[in-house]
Amino acid sequence: MPIGDLAPEIAVLFTAVATLLFAMFAPRRLHVVGAIIALSGLTVAGVLLADQLGRTGTTFSGTFAIDGVGVWARFLILVATGVCVMISPGWFATDRRHGEVYAVFLLSAVGAMALAGAADLMQLVVAVLLSSVTGYTLAAYHRGWAISVEAGMKYFLIGALANAVLVTGVVFVTGMAGVTGYEPLANAFADGLIASPLLVAGLAMVAVGIAYKLGAAPAHTWVPDVAEGAPVPSAAFLTVVPKIGAAVAFARLVTAVPPDALALRPLVATIAAVTMTIGNLAALRQQDVRRLLGWSSVSQAGYVLMAVVVIDLDTGAPTALVAMLGAYTVGNIAAFAVVADLRGRTALSDYSGLAARRPLDAVVLALAFLSLVGIPPTVGFFGKFTVFEVTIAGGYGWLALVAATNTVVSLIYYARVLSPMVFDASTNGAVAQLDKMTWAAAVATGSAIIALGLTAGLLLDQLADISLL
Amino acid sequence: MLTLAILVPFVGALVLVTAPGLRATTSRALAVATAAVPLALLCFAWSRFSLGGTDFQLVEEMAWVPALGVAWRVGVDGVSLALSLMTGVLFVATIAWPMEQRERERQYYAWFLFLEAASLGLFLTLDLLVFYVFFDLSLVGMFFLIGRWGHGERQAAALKFFIYTFVGSLAILLAIIVLVLRTDPMTFDMRVLIAQQPLAGAGPVATLVFLGFVMGFAIKAPLFPVHTWLPPAHVNAPGPASAILAGVLLKMGTYGMVRMPLQMMRETFAAYALPLAVVALASILWGAFVALGQTSIKRRIAYTSVNHMGYAVLGIAAAGALVAGEEHARQLALTGAVVEMVAHGLITGTLFLLAGSIWARADTYEMDRFGGLAGVAPKLTAATVVAAFASLGLPGLAGFVAEVQIFIGAFAVFPWVAAVGLVGILITAALFLTMLLQVFFGERPVERNAFADVGRVEGAVLLAILALVVVIGVYPAWLLDLVNAATDSAVVGTATVAPGG
């Protein structure tokens, strides 16, 4: 029954509708129940998704792929959305449209899941649009606050341009190859499809469209603004969830193009190198922790792309892709959860002496940063290490070298936050805390950074030999 | 068993942290008892260790990340067993030693036990990734001990220590990763890496990896010119933490140098042995001359550490130079270096404990504020005199055994470097003698008339450690046999082994 293949997406969709209806009729003080409905729906979707583990194949006439990478990526999307939902009740409690935010989160998650499964250019366009339209709403959710509106506006303008480029690229590719599915496209290349300039341009434009969702160069400029201006739960969501879907979508596109037919891989490698370098250099000078996190998330997208570059060149690449995405997800969400728990405090100087006043938040933030750098035994080490391994094995040693240099540089800006936090004398007064649920989310993700690192052996065994169609 | 030696202090630290009602005396008793367990376990391990057996013995293994060849692997050879025994002794001594500033005792002892677990873990593990993790954990432990319980500019000193050594550890991590990526199938197992020599003939890559290791470990050891974090860290740390810093943490640098560059990259090490020996020489001389210029007791002792670790590195460099026909001299140098690590740990550990008790009584380290302490504190004086003579290398004490072997070995390999290095010994003798004269003899300032001698616990600790120093000095065979068992294969080794061997 093919409709059952989309059961997780359908579950999330129905939950979104349920939260929306609930928010319409329930009084505002009860809107927190929406979070509970959302979490239950995400759990159900996770259970339904577990049923697809081990399957490899496409469904709905070859437009949606169900394979190891897809299933794990969609699972990550569900978990990440769940954590974002957890940090929302405290944050949006005073917002008049509190209840609706869960519906938007869930719809956006469906878009990201569709992106992760997209095995067809048309499906890709639909997924990008669903994920983007809901994303604009999330970024500008505080519509009375100029910075939030600015973030939403910037996200929208760059998104509109990137989506137009994407659609045009899809038209070019479809026109030259005569097909929209990735499998037919790969077959067409095998049958001697010539890489005409229009086809190359089309593929490059599709890549730019996906890079926008991934927050990678050249369409990355929205990330720092969204990280700084959007409500913190939205920022956590937008810097993680769409990226998971986009990274897998990118990998699927690269797989469809044989290495000898067209030099798509060197292009992606260049995007990866530029992305990580720009993200890191820009992060160095930030005075705003949320903006810094935004730029760090840009650079992390570059590391994720390393696994995409070598996707068919080394057998371990799918594993590395999922491991890196998982490690990034946990680390980045933990950092944002701490920021939310501190009620969104954002100036670098506000973090001085935090370790003395809020030790647990400081520990989680330190763990998150160490994980993003890749210091063992955090989960970040295993994510990054597997990516480095496959990149070198896949013949892109220079990219690994660029990434290693960037990793060392990245330590500087993370240290700029951490060292005053630990070493400076604490300044005046108590630090306001958001609420218990946000605190729990921060502690849970912080513990996960260590726990997943310690159980990395089991996880990597689970991920070994996962398939990517 | 070895795993237990690491786990017990760690669990003890957790218990101390999570038991809020514990009184200071109970915390201390519990901490001493906990610290004694690993020492007993290690002594038992020693009794089971076979001198003629395989390189690494008493191995315990548990899978962690099989896909990447990472596992919990512990085991000992003569070098790591000797160093971990010394670590066990020193931790019992420093935990038993009275605190300088009695505040937050429970946390203080918890951090000490945590640091013991990290230090033992580092010496006992046979997995490079686990090694790196313990290396970083030891930084965290020492950082909090200096930052919270130190005096003076303690936070700045702790920060400087942390940043220097963390940057060094990053270089080590990168070197480890490149080294491991060259193995097939990939493994972090030290035994396999030593057998495979994965970077043999790798050209500039090998040089970079070597530099990464040497830089990281040179910061930790510390060698000139990256030693500048050491004096402030020592001066501002509480005495027992100083003793651990000098006695155990510095050894991590030299131990790492033996284990990784020397054993895993023989070919590259041989090519750069002479430059390394010259750096060691610079440390020997710089440490000695600068120590001579210090007016503070603790700074003076701190700089002699730079000098002594220079001797150890000189021995390691001599051991790694592939000079044909000098196998025996090279082994002698390496054995000397390892014995120097043990001896320096015990001797300098004692000196820092003594400096700590002087601070606790007088609130200053300035030598000219003291004089004639021998009259009021004969036991303290006796202990300091013995430790100082041991440190300057008087025959019959532990330091002599180490230095004589290093220099005999080094003369055969790098005669000129060794000859110039001898100057260091002369200076060290001068600086210790002048310090003893100034502080303990001559005219006593009036304010020192009430200077109290060492207490019962302090006396017992000093007696135990110094007895060990004398035993090693008079009858070193037991230690030399243990160390020789390892240095033999480390020096001779098979130059190249086919991959997979």
Image (spheres, coloured by chain):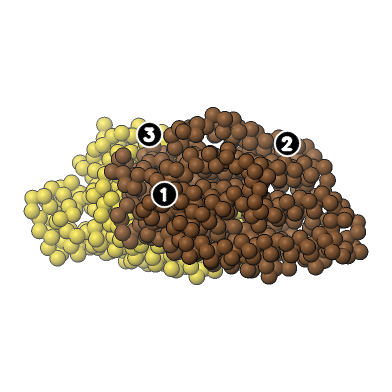
Q: Is residue A223 left or right of residue A286?
A: left
Instruction: Tell me the element at label 3.
Output: helix
Q: Which chain is yellow?
A: A
Q: Amino acid at mark 2?
A: Leu
Discs 1 and 2 lie in a common subunit:
yes
Q: Would you call the spot at circle 2 few (<14 residues within 10 Å), some (14-19), or many (20 or more)?
A: some
Q: Position of residue B66 (x, y in %)?
A: 39, 37
Q: Name the residue: 57% across, 44% down.
A: B83
Q: Which chain is brown?
A: B
N-term-proximal mark, 1 vs 2: 2
Residue underneath mark 3: A50
Name the residue tied to disc 1.
B327
Residue closest to the eye, B374 or A89: B374
Name which residue lies at 37% across and 59% down: B271
Camera-nearest label, 1 or 2: 1
Q: Is residue B129 left or right of residue B21?
A: left
